[in-house]
Image (cartoon, grey):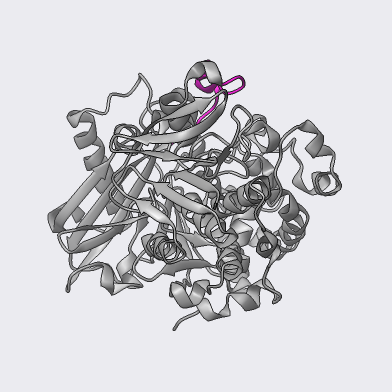
Amino acid sequence: MAKKVVIVGAGPGGLASAMQLAKAGADVTILERQDWVGGRTATFDQDGFKFDIGPTFFLYPRVLQEIFASVGFDLMDEIPMRRLDPQYRVSFGAGGRLDATPNIDEMERQVSQLSPADRGSVRRYMDDNREKLRKFRPILESPFENVWDLMNLDVLAAAPSVKPWRSLHAELSCYFKDPRLAIAFSFQSKYLGMSPMRCPSLFSILSFLEYEYGVFHPMGGCGQVSKRMAEIAQSMGVDLRLGQPVTGFSFQGRRPTQVHTQEESFDADAVIINADFAGAMTRLVPDKLRRRWTDEKIRTKKFSCSTFMMYLGIQGSYPDLPHHTIHIAPDYERNLREIEQDFVLPEDPSFYVQNACVTDSSLAPQDCSTLYVLLPVPHAHENIVWDEATTSRYRELALKQLAKEGLGDVGSRIVTERIITPRTWEEDFGLYRGATFNLAHNLGQMLHKRPHNRFEDLEGVYLVGGGTHPGSGLPVIYESSRITCKQLIPDLGLNGDFLTQTSSSPANKDLEPCLQA
C-alpha cells in the first residue's frame, strides 16, 4: 500500500513537494485553508482586474525548472514568462534614479553617471558574487540539522566569501562609494523582511541573481505558477482539498497519525507543514509536545517586518512607469529603524509599486491598468492599532508617496481597490504577528538554528516554506521542498533517484526560452 503523506498548506513549497512525492509513488493529500492554491503566491480577481497577492518578482527560475524536469515537465512550456528589461527602477528620495538592467555595460554607464567614483564597481561586484554563489549553492541545497553540519567542507570553503561578521550594507559599501548605490544593490534584503544594516552579508547574492539570471514576469501573474503546479500535481494523482483548514492532529507519542479538518480526518505516515511555521505550531501542535520550539521560545524569536498593501484598479495607464519601481526614502536608515526597532509607522516611507500592465495587458480591462503598492511596516505590535482610522490615514500617505513618482492624483482614477494590513496578514492568512516574511534571517536564525526541514520536535513531521532552511523568497522556498523530499522520500522507503536529476545545460542557456519579445 502506498505511503500516505498529508501536506498542510498549498503554498509554493507544498505544491512543489506534492509533485515530487507523487513522482516517488506516495499517496499525497494537500489540505488548504483558503479557497485557492498558492497561499500568498496567488492571483485574485476583483471587478475584472487581476492582482498577485504577494510575490511579484519571479527570480532564479533554475530551481523550479529543475523540479519540473525531475517529474517530467518543462517549466517554460507550462508557464510562459517574460524577462524584464529594465528589471526595475530604483528611485532615490535623496535624488537620482537607476533603471536596473541585465545589460552590464548599460549598468556601468548609469552608475558612472550617477557616481563617477564608482566606475567599474558593477563588474567587480558581479565577479565576486558569481564566485560566492558557486561556493554557497551546495549549502543552500543541503539540510542543516545540527552544529556539526557547519563543519562540512562546503561550509568551510564558503566561509571566507560569506563574511558572516559583516552586514549586507557594510558588504555593499565595500563595492560602492556612493551610499545610494550601496542601497540599490542591497535593498533586496527586504525580500527577507530585513534591513540591510542587520542582514548578513551572504545575501549580496540576491541582487546578483537578478542581474545574472533575470527578473521575470509569468504571464497572468506569479499566481499562474502556483495554479499550474496544482494542476500538474492533481494530474499526478494528488488529492487537493481547498477550503479545509486543518484543526489539529492525533498523536501517538510525538508522531501525528491523523490530520483533522472540521469535515474529516486523514491518516498519515508523514506530515509536511507548509503553513506559516510559528502560526501553525502555536495553533495546531500542543506546547507540551515541543521541546525546542515551545510557545515561549517562539515568542522570543526575531520576526520579519510586515507590509501595508494596496491593490488598485485604475482608469487609464502609466506607460512611462516601469513594471517595477522601488522608491527609497530620503533617510533610509531612519526608515528601517522605525520599522524594525522603534515599531512605529514611518511618515516618509520607502515603497514599491508594480505597474504590471506595461508588460501584461491581460491583467486589467481595456483602457485600465493595475497598480500594486507595498509599504514595509512593522509586524503586529502594541504600538500600532490597525483600526479603520489608521488604515485610512496610511492609505492617504501611500497615495501621496505615489505622487512623488509622478503618478499625480492616483486616488481620482481608482476604479476598485483592496487593502491588506499586518492585522489582515495575521487574521486572514495565519501569519504569526503578521510577519510577511516569516522568521528573520539573522545569524542566530539561519542554517541549523532555523526550524529543520525534518522537524526536530516531532516524529514524521517535515517543514517546507519560508520558516525552515534555507529561508524566505520563492527560489529558496522551492529549494526547501527539494531538501525536504530528499529526506522524506528515503524515510518512507520510496525511490527518490529522480531527485538527483538536474539540467545538463548551463543555467543561462536554460533560461533562454523565457525571453519573449
**Residue 65 locus on image (x, y percent):** 57, 68
Q: Residue 400: in sight, yes or no?
A: no
Q: Is residue 132 left or right of residue 437?
A: right
Instruction: Decide: is 511 above or below 40.
Output: below
**Which residue is at the front of the view, 1 or 149?**
1
* Residue visible at 68% across and 50% down in the picture: 490
**Residue 193 locus on image (x, y percent):** 49, 40
Quadrant where the image shows the C terminus: bottom left
**Which residue is at the front of the view, 445 or 36?**
36
| Magenta stretch holds residue 301 | yes
Q: Which residues are magenta?
A: 290-305
Instruction: Decide: is 285 above or below 435.
Output: above
Residue 338 lies in what quarter of the image? Answer: top left
Which SS type dominates the magenta stretch?
Answer: loop
* Residue visible at 77% across and 59% down in the picture: 131
**Residue 356 locus on image (x, y percent):** 34, 65
